[in-house]
Image (cartoon, helix red, strand yellow):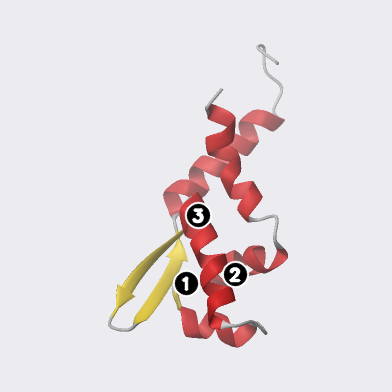
Amino acid sequence: MNYYPENTKVFKALGDPKRAMIVDMLSCGELCACKILERFEMSQSTLSHHMKILCECGIVKAREEGKWTYYSPDDETISKTKQFFDTITSAKENCI
């Protein structure tokens, strides 16, 4: 039963349109928080909150370089999430 909560964290995080947009932005490559902030009308603390949620669910990873934080997609989590979605939406012998 732990299979579902672990795999649905990403979907919950993406339930916010701004977080989905941030992930879309990151699909083009790593970005500094300052570049993400330029796209949105929000405070630095609000962006930090969104990034914390995206990092905690595992879909985004962060690295610090000096005073800047850079964000990028976590390919492993994205792959697992795609596989989970495919599994729950495909016909199978052992349905719930």
- Above-or-below relation of 14 to 96: below
User: Horizontal and vertical percent for residue 47?
Assistant: 56, 74
N-term-proximal mark, 2 vs 3 = 2
Is residue 27 shown to the viewer in this render?
A: no
Image disc number at residue 64: none
* Badge 1: residue crowd in 10 Å (few <14, some 14–19, many ≥20): few
Image disc number at residue 22: 2
CA–CA distance in space, label 1 to label 2: 11 Å
Of residues 3 and 24, the one drawn nearer to the viewer in this rendering: 3
N-term-proximal mark, 1 vs 2 = 2
- Above-or-below relation of 93 to 4: above
Location of mark 1 (residue)? 29
N-term-proximal mark, 1 vs 3 = 1
State which quadrant residue 85 falls in: top right
Residue drawn 47% across the image and 58% down it = 55
- Is 9 displayed left or right of 58 in the figure? right
The quarter of the rendered structure image containing the C terminus is: top right
The nearer-to-camera label among 1 and 2 is 2
